[in-house]
Structures are given as C-alpha cells and as structure tokens.
Image (tube, helix red, strand yellow):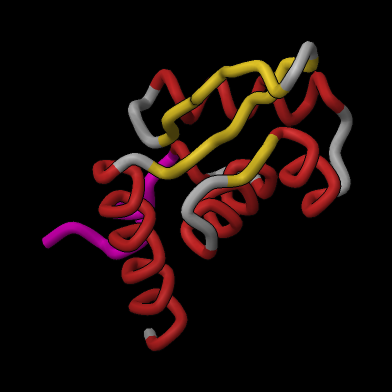
Amino acid sequence: MKHVIHTLNKAFDHRVRLGVMAVLLANDSVSFTELKEALDLTDGNLASHVAALEKAGYVEVSKQFLGKKPNTTYSASASGKQAFQEHLNALEKLLRG
C-alpha cells in the first residue's frame, strides 16, 4: 500500500503554486495583478510558477486588451480543480495520521 505522502501532487509542492491554486479555486478568474498582490510576488516569480501550472494543464490563461492595456487572467482548469482537491485530501489524511 502506498504511503499517503507519496500521493501528494508534486506540482503543488512549492508554496507559490499552492497559493496560486488556492486563490484560483476561491475565484472564477483572477487577473495577473490581483494574483500578484494577493500572494505578494514579483512579476517574474508569479509568471514562472503560473507557467509551470499551465504546462501541467492545471491553469487556463486568457489574454486580452482592455482599451490599449493588456490584461491577463487566470482560472483553474477542471483537471486543476480535481488535482488540487486530491492534493488537499491527501494533506488532510496526512494530518489525521
């Protein structure tokens, strides 16, 4: 039988990725600026972690212009929501012993 620690999703190992997913699950979509401010991150730090989550298929990115200003928003994909919930369930099992 696999120990519960081995069921944790490595994509969420880093605190920034854990934070990104937590914010995205609490909201339908979040702009780059809102996410950056909510997690107190630099542009580059947020961009690299979101890119990793996007590559894993956990985050969907929407880019558009509001007037002449670019606006990027993020949302959790269906597979991202499921994977994050499974990760949280594994964490809960680990905490319960």
Label tally: 0
Report x, y in % for residue 84.
38, 54
Q: Nearer the viewer, residue 91 or 79?
A: 79
17 lies above or below 59: below
Q: Is residue 29 left or right of residue 33?
A: left
Please identify the quarter of the rendering in which residue 88 is found.
bottom left
Report x, y in % for residue 74.
54, 36
Report x, y in % for residue 61.
49, 25
Q: Quadrant of the C terminus?
A: bottom left
Q: Nearer the viewer, residue 68 or 73?
A: 68
Please identify the quarter of the rendering in which residue 51 is found.
top right
Q: Quadrant of the N terminus?
A: bottom left
In the picture as drawn, the residue positioned furthest to the bottom comes out as 96
Q: Residue at x 34, y 44 (%)?
A: 80
Write the start and end of the magenta stretch as one range.
1-10
In the picture as drawn, the residue positioned furthest to the front comes out as 67
70 lies above or below 25: above
In the picture as drawn, the residue positioned furthest to the left comes out as 1
Q: Is residue 22 magenta?
A: no
64 lies above or below 10: above
Q: Residue at x 37, y 26 (%)?
A: 56
Q: Is residue 79 left or right of residue 13?
A: left
Q: Residue at x 48, y 30 (%)?
A: 53
In the picture as drawn, the residue positioned furthest to the top comes out as 68
